[in-house]
Amino acid sequence: MAIIIDGAKLAQEIRTEIKNEVKKLIINNKRAPGLAVIQIGADPASTIYVRNKIKACAEVGVESFGFTLQNTATEQEVLSLISDLNADSRIDGILCQLPLPVHIDQNKIIFAIAPDKDVDGFHPYNVGLLSMGNPNALVACTPQGCIKMLKAYGIPTRGKRAVVVGRSNIVGRPMALLLLGLDCTVTITHSHTPAEDLPAICREADILVAATGKAGLITPEFVNSDQVILDVGISRTTNGKIVGDVDFTAVEPIVKAITPVPGGVGPVTIAMLLKNTLASYRRRMAD
Ligand code: NAD
């Protein structure tokens, strides 16, 4: 039986810490940290993510500023909103919920957000700092949350073998850089890794991070009994159930530790968004 890495509990602990810090700010007559959340269009999954982020802000006392734009909004309208938010002194973090409608260039939007308000950690400036191992980077929330889980459960990283399945800018790549920064020997696999090679590569891992969105990709032949698995994937089955990339029922009895889906990486991701917003606030107030 594996240790179940309880993301929901860890996230609650982090939120409580943040809530206490924000309370102290308010007692000292400081303004609350502010997070701007932009949603373009009405993608149902995005609507749920945005709602959860705004709810999490309210719970800890971070002021949220929601902006919902029509699916037909032009790129210029979005850029103009971001420019206003960059200049707005009440706002410490700006996030634009992805995916964007196809007529909007995602890179243009990411590049337009001021790096010091880039609480998603997607701006090339922050990605550059991360790749240099610079601690001042605002780091993407999901991989940062994964590291938080490893640390909270005392899972060693130095000299360990880590395999990351998936190479997106949002999860896989920053995840690999963070593990590298913690002295892991890191392998990144992706959709062009020959499928017949993948199980053996994954089996070598002390830490396996699955971030593909392919439900049930990771089966017993991908794992070993000393392995810690962080399952980032989120897929909805035909009967509406949320599942990860790992065939949890088959794999959990074999490995040392594993995150469940739901209740694993997801809640910690949102907690890291709040943490980044507070960090960004503190830097701004210290200027
Ligand atoms: P993405 O589609 O941008 O990237 C998926 C990656 O998986 C790609 O790099 C691709 O090469 C790789 N891949 C796909 N099929 C593969 C296969 N068969 N073998 C090996 N590699 C394969 O997705 P993303 O934004 O990185 O998100 C990945 C998953 O994580 C999704 O399910 C997403 O919903 C989920 N996610 C969860 C959270 C969270 O908070 N828990 C946050 C972000 C993303």
Image (cartoon, grey):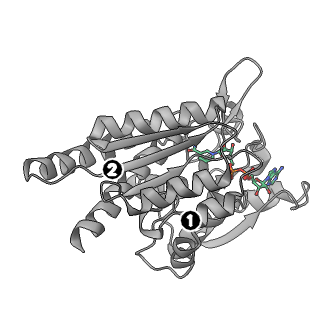
Indicate the secondary structure of the residue bearing disc 2.
strand
Q: Residue at x 62, y 38 (%)?
A: 252
Q: Amino acid at mark 2?
A: Gly
What residue type is disc 1 on? Ala
Residue 147 shows up from this direction: no
Rendered residue at 43%/62% (across/down): 86
Contact between marks 2 and 1 (CB within 8 A): the answer is no
Q: Which residue is disc 1 drawn over? A: 112
Q: Report the disc number at residue 34.
A: 2
Q: Residues within 10 Å of mark 2 (few under 14, many from 20)?
A: many
Q: Position of residue 60 (x, y in %)?
A: 28, 40
**Dot 1: element:** helix
Mark 1 closeness class: few <14, some 14–19, many ≥20 residues within 10 Å: some
The residue shown at (60%, 62%) is 110
In the displayed structure image, the side of residue 5 where residue 180 appears, left or right: right
Q: Is residue 130 above or below residue 85?
A: below
Q: Nearer the viewer, residue 138 or 254?
A: 138
Quadrant location of the C terminus? bottom left
Percent coordinates x, y for residue 151 in the rendering: 41, 58
Q: Position of residue 176 (x, y in %)?
A: 62, 67
Residue that protrudes farthest toward the left in the picture: 28
Where 208 sits versus 282, above or below? above
Query: Which image quarter holds the N terminus?
Result: top right
**Whole-number angstrom distance, CA of label 2 to CA of label 1:** 18 Å
Farthest-out residue, top: 239
Q: Is residue 108 left or right of residue 274?
A: right
Q: Is residue 217 above or below residue 152?
A: above
